[in-house]
Image: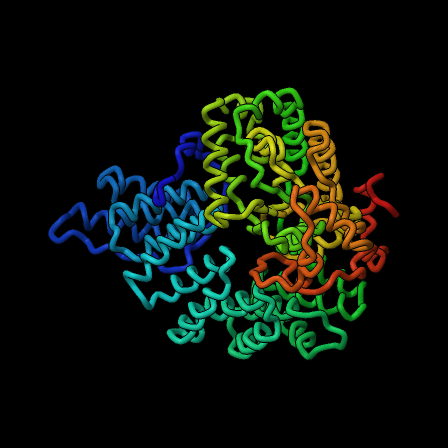
């Protein structure tokens, strides 16, 4: 695959016009010098300045229209392409990638274009081209703080956390108050298990009034608190400051909830978690999702998957750990990846990107049947080979490479088609515990189903319905790893896991918490500890506060 352009299957992508929020780039858009003596150049520059102002005002359709007018007059105008790329961020990342790639092609000496292209590649889990373009941005502008931080984030995501630290340290020397550097360094330290050092830097960020809600939220997750820390009063005081906005308030409420939960003040903690989720303002279209699940179940029959799998790859390298978030996926990956023949690649969005490319998006607006009909034997072979090569970039010699993106549970049919011998580990946990654990975390908008207790319970039922279908489609292929079983008998269940992977037992799998690697999920503190049982039936602490969830789960709730 080209390091600059989307892969061959990008031709399947269709840009859909939907409402969207503005997502501003982390760096100011580069300014293009007007063409001397050119009326057209002056007109273009004026139009693009106006487009930037419209973007700031969240009048995105008008900003896009102005950029397209500029391109009609001046084809491949790099700044117009760049602005169109920023308009796609968070709405259509593939579209953003294409525009940033074109901007780089037109003006390869512009560091900002390389940086933006590298960052969107990083968001799409395309680590090799991401690192290449961010490094090129730094070659062009060595003191670009945003590029130093982006490269640090890329190394961290690529399981090279130690290489990230000096980049953030250099960024802080250039600008000690830059929020990306201030938050990036403690995040990298925490991902490596160096929680005490991370906490020192986060406290300094708070003292310097840099990204205060974010810093507090990260700080309270660096350890478990047994005594009330001064940060609790400070967080409650910050909540009275309207300047933090809705996003900041959501972070602070979740931080307060985490501390109160640690201290055993469960009713007060749940009150903050609820307020935090309300402040986020996230909504989820459950009926749309339910119709999509219906369509997937109708499309991916056992017969269809078996017939198409003949054209995929027989490789045993890919391992997919799936399930609801907070079901034990990180713990399971760490146990598996402690084996010397297994590489844990973390949460990769590659498979989702591939699915989106052929139209398998999680929305009833798409038709899974029509999308699957476009998957020819040749395309099946190409997709499988490309995905396997992508995994091999992470660990060329590993016998098994683990992708633990939980929501790949939606794509098990595609996995079955592409990789007839892939291992699929399904992590399942007590339904109420699992949902409560989701509710109390501040997830991204990708997990908007988790912001409301009733919606969360109903979503869980759809997940359960889909997983039951996959066990019929791939009988005997999916290993169900029950969280409570793993907690109760770590060694026995760990041995079952390694045996399922087709590997000999190694005692290192019992000391997963000693692994020297980066962890970049919400469980980054927990997986550094030996297995503990306090999270089993944790929901009982909140029983009086979560009745809408229990009612929504129905017969799946083990009360």
Q: Position of residue 399 (x, y in %)?
A: 56, 45
Q: Is residue 218 above or below residue 302?
A: below
- Could you tell me if residue 490 is visible in this image? yes
- Expressed as whole percent of the image width and height from the top left, the position of residue 235 reads 65, 72
Relative depth, front residue between 475 and 446? 475
Tell me how the rendering is colored. Answer: rainbow
Reply above or below: 51 against 206.
Answer: above
Q: Position of residue 509 (x, y in %)?
A: 68, 56
Which residue shows up at 54% across the image and 75% down it?
A: 201
Q: Nearer the viewer, residue 241 or 485?
A: 485
Q: Residue drawn 62% across and 34% down?
A: 412
Residue appearing at x 50%, y 69% in the figure:
185
Quadrant of the rendering where the N terminus is positioned: top left
Instruction: Give left or right: position of 551 versus 229.
Output: right
Horizontal side, residue 195 vs residue 494: left or right: left
Apparent side of residue 338 relative to residue 47 in the rendered image (left or right): right
Quadrant of the rendered image containing residue 276: bottom right
Task: Report whether residue 99 is seen.
Answer: no
Counting labels gives 0
Q: Residue 16, position in %: x, y?
A: 46, 34
Residue at image position (31%, 43%) is 102
Residue furthest to the right in view is 559
Q: Nearer the viewer, residue 532 or 10?
A: 532
Task: Looking at this view, name the residue that lies furthest to the left.
Answer: 37
17 vs 150: above or below: above
């Amino acid at each position: 695959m080209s390091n600059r352009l989307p892969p061959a299957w990008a031709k399947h992508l269709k840009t859909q016009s939907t409402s969207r929020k503005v997502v501003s780039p982390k760096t100011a858009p580069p300014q293009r010098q007007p063409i001397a003596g050119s009326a057209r150049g002056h007109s273009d520059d004026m139009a693009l300045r106006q487009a930037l102002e419209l973007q700031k005002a969240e009048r995105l359709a008008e900003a896009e229209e102005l950029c397209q007018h500029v391109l009609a007059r001046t084809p491949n105008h790099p700044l117009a392409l760049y602005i169109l790329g920023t308009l796609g961020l968070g709405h259509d990342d593939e579209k953003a990638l294409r525009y940033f790639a074109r901007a780089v092609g037109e003006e390869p000496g512009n560091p900002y274009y390389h940086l933006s292209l590298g960052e969107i590649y990083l968001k799409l889990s395309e680590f090799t081209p991401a690192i290449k373009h961010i490094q090129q941005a730094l070659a062009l502008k060595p003191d670009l703080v945003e590029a130093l931080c982006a490269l640090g984030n890329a190394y961290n995501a690529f399981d090279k956390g130690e290489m990230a630290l000096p980049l953030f340290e250099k960024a802080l020397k250039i600008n000690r108050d830059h929020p990306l550097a201030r938050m990036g360094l403690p995040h990298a330290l925490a991902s490596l298990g160096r929680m005490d050092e991370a906490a020192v830097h986060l406290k300094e960020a708070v003292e310097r009034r840099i990204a205060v809600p974010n810093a507090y939220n990260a700080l309270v997750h660096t350890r478990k608190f047994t005594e009330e820390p001064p940060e609790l009063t400070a967080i409650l005081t910050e909540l009275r400051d309207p300047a933090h906005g809705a996003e900041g308030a959501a972070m602070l409420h979740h931080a307060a909830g985490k501390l109160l939960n640690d201290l055993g003040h469960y009713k007060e903690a749940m009150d903050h978690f609820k307020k935090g989720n309300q402040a986020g303002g996230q909504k989820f279209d459950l009926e749309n999702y339910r119709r999509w699940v219906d369509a997937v179940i109708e499309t991916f029959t056992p017969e269809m998957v078996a017939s198409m799998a003949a054209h995929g790859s027989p490789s045993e390298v890919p391992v997919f750990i799936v399930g609801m978030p907070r079901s034990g996926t990180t713990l399971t990956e760490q146990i598996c990846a402690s084996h010397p023949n297994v590489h844990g690649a973390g949460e990769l969005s590659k498979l989702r990107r591939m699915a989106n490319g052929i139209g398998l998006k999680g929305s009833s607006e798409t038709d899974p049947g029509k999308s699957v009909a476009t998957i020819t034997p040749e395309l099946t072979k190409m997709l499988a080979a490309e995905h396997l090569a992508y995994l091999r970039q992470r660990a060329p010699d590993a016998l098994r490479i683990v992708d633990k993106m939980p929501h790949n549970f939606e794509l098990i049919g595609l996995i079955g088609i592409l990789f007839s011998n892939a291992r699929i580990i399904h992590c399942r946990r007590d339904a109420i515990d699992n949902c409560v654990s989701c509710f109390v975390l501040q997830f991204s908008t990708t997990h908007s189903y988790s912001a409301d207790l009733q919606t969360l319970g109903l979503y869980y039922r759809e997940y359960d319905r889909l997983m039951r279908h996959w066990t019929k489609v791939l009988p005997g292929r999916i290993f169900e790893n029950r969280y409570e079983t793993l907690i109760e008998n770590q060694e026995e269940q760990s041995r079952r896991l390694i045996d399922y992977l087709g590997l000999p037992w190694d005692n290192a799998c019992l000391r997963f918490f000693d692994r020297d690697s980066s962890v970049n999920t919400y469980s980054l503190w927990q997986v550094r500890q030996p297995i503990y049982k306090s999270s089993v039936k944790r929901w009982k602490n909140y029983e009086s506060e979560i009745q809408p969830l229990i009612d929504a789960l129905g017969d799946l709730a083990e009360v």
